[in-house]
Image (cartoon, rainbow, N blue to C red):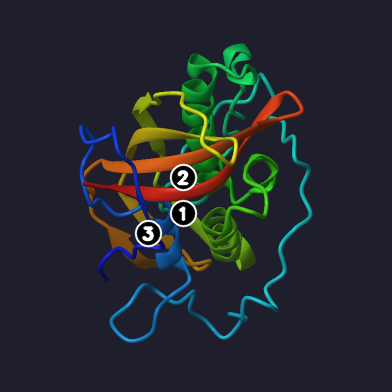
Amino acid sequence: MTSQKFFTTRASGFGALRSGAAVLAVGSALALSGCGAGGAPEPGGSSSQSASETPTPTASATPTSTPSAVYKPADASGPAQNVPVPVLPEVAKTETKEGAEAFAKYWFSVLSYAYETGDAALFESIAPSPCEACQKVSKVIKDWHAEGRWLVGGRLSTPVANTTFTKGQNGTYQVAAQVHQDPLTYMRADGTVARTDPQAPDQGNLLVLAYADGKWSVVELGNIVG
């Protein structure tokens, strides 16, 4: 299935990043929800439920991991274990150019944590409801991780995050981010593979950030076009 574009945001001044690239996180996550014939894998099995019926566990917005526990990435035998919880850098708490760029990298690390664990509470706490794309990503990640399913791979890293730190008329800032995602495999509860996505090229993503009450949040997520 071809990666889907949820929406496009034109960002002048960020032409160095890949023009016209699909929104990485949104395109990959939307694939989890299935899109009919020739599309992404359905969860499979008679226990599969609709999105409105799929139970999702209540989780704290501040997940913790046991310091002494050993991290084990997900593989064909089971989901990831003891995934380190991303830590917000001190600079990412400031309304500065460096703070916005650091927060953007942190945001993608939190999204990566959600991919590995299925726990999207922390992600949702820094991507509130105004960001519709963020909410879709969160929902499909949780839906896939329900009923014993899990994901292998899909970890995100952000080699570059850059902003001109120019506040828009609506009080927001734009941060361009180059994002890398490892190949992703969708595992059913019985241990069979629903689908494997090949390695995709790095994507140019645009985060629209707002700063209020001493912290950043994501207002909108889009892809960069020329």
State which mark lies toward you, 1 or 3.
Answer: 3
Residue at horizontal 71 percent and vertical 63 percent from the top = 56
Q: Are marks 1 and 2 in contact (CB under 8 Å)?
A: yes
Q: Secondary structure at mark 2?
A: loop
Q: Are marks 2 and 3 in contact (CB under 8 Å)?
A: no
Q: Are marks 1 and 3 in contact (CB under 8 Å)?
A: no
Which residue is the site of mark 2? 74
Q: Secondary structure at mark 1?
A: strand
State which mark lies toward you, 2 or 3.
Answer: 3
Spatial CA span between label 2 and label 3 = 21 Å
Which residue is the site of mark 3? 27
Where is residue 160 drawn, in percent x and y? Answer: 33, 25
Residue type, label 3: Gly
Q: Earlier in the sequence, mark 1 or mark 2?
A: 2
Density class for disc 3 (Cα within 10 Å; few <14, some 14-19, many ≥20) is some
Residue type, label 1: Leu
Which residue is the site of mark 1? 151
Where is residue 75 drawn, in percent x and y? Answer: 42, 47
Where is residue 118 drawn, in percent x and y? Answer: 59, 51
Residue type, label 2: Ala
Q: Quadrant of the N terminus?
A: bottom left
